[in-house]
Amino acid sequence: MFELSILTGVGIFAVTLPGFLLLVRREWENSGAGLFLLSPACVFYVAYLASFAVRPPFQVAGALQYDFAVGADASLFLAQATSVLAWYGFVIGYYLTPSPGLQALIARAGPPPVDIRLKAAAAYGLSFVASLAFVISLAPLGVFTFDFGSNRVNYLNAMFGAGHMYLFNLAAGILLLMGLVFSSFCARPPRMLAIAAWAAYLIPNAFVTNRFVFSAALFALLLVAALRRIRRGERISATTVVVVLCLLAAVGAALGLVRGLTEGLEYGEERSNPLVFFLWTFDMSEFYQIALQNVHQLDLGRSWVEDMFLLFLPRAFFPWKPTIYGAVRLQAEAMPGSVPPDGILSATYPISMFGEGYANFGIPGLLLVGLAIGIILKLVFSRALHAGLVPRQSFWPVACFCLFVLVCANALGYLRSFGWFASMLVFHTIVYACCYLAVWVIAEVCRSAVQNSATASPRAREGLHGG
């Protein structure tokens, strides 16, 4: 069985590689050469292979199985075979979604707006304020210690029913990214405000070891630096991108290790085998296998609708909001052992976008969800590149830049649950729109004040002279 799982993994690679090469041929130059390595096409494929080609032998060997998720051998092979439908659905959606090339974007870039420095300063200033609000909400938890593991546990326990903390941190991150994009077009960016905003955002998130938030901010710096090089007519080296991505992964791994939580895990091999440590994250294939075994009635899109409308609905204002719905409800149906008797979850084990596609529309659902992911990610990524190359008409491009960094660049977000992914896109867009409105208002007020001051100064001098 172990040898067979290796062979099927090699088979998955061989069957899916033509689709990846097709995307490379179409998108390599369109995405700025080495910048393609940061694109959803590359990230999705690597994460997919990790889950469905590399993970199965370790699962069969017993190093990676969850106690409540033991599947039959036949389910593993069926999961591997049908997952190919989701991959090629992604390829079709990504390939057919039109996007302008980088050279076409640069050709119509034009000079930056005169108020872009004001917008950058306003975004950084508001980000600092939002981060300060996040710090104030964290203070009663006692998480500003060097016991990072305890900090993390206290923070996660406090997050249930404390949506304001998530909102403060999300707004701070979005405003930080907005300031980064705007300041990249400034000859004299607001450096002091930028330093204050970045420090206020990164330091508290480091104390509670928000690994993704920390890595996403650094990833945004990498992406903007790459786009600035492209604006100057330089090419992005694939080797440089790989090295920097490895450094970012090392930062995330270090934050995970420093909190010391792995010492309490049952599976000792995770601590001694770096590959096993890496593969624990890519559990989508295993949970999809359980869905194939235990889901017997199609949901027909109900779980996705529940996640879209309920996930970010504040329970304080809507007490009727159920505890188990959407992706968690499908998890409870597929893996009853993952839900405590009291129904209060301290952790979730979503059955993955593959499992959700199957649970909602059967085997054709995998092609459908792959197609949707491909279209969405291509649109968001292409507009995110637009944000770093064209300074005008910035509302939607900068929105997509924020969505790409915070939602779409991390493949685990959509691979674990399509319903959560779609809901996060909508909610993040709403928060972004509010942040953008605040930045625009502050920039307009400041610009009007400067113009009025410049207009009033000659009149004031004339009055003094006449007196």
Image: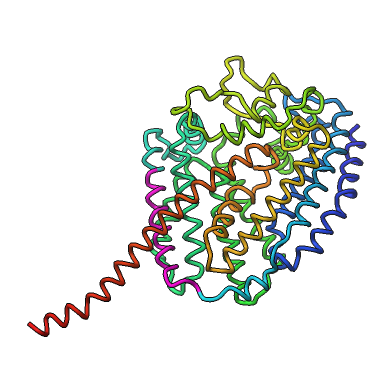
Quadrant of the image occupied by residue 460: bottom left
238 or 251, nearer to the observer: 238
Query: Which segment is the magenta one?
Result: 112-133
- Tell me the residue at 72%/31% (across/down): 351
x and y percent of residue 137 in the render?
39, 38
Asked where in the image residue 21 lies, by quadrant, the reply is bottom right
Residue located 45% across and 40% down the image: 146
Q: Is residue 110 above or below residue 89?
A: below
**Quadrant of the snapshot with the N terminus:** top right
Main secondary-structure element of the magenta-colored stretch: helix
Residue at the image position 56 percent from the left and 31 percent from the top: 310
The colour scheme is rainbow
For the view shown, which residue lies furthest in the top direction? 341
- Residue sitting at x 43%, y 37%: 164
Residue 42 x %, y %: 74, 55
Magenta region includes residue 123: yes
Q: Residue 270, located in which quarter of the rendered image?
A: top right
Q: Position of residue 276 (x, y in %)?
A: 73, 39
What is the count of numbered marks? 0
**Outermost bottom residue:** 465
Q: Nearer the viewer, residue 61 or 339?
A: 339
357 to 50, vertically: above or below: above
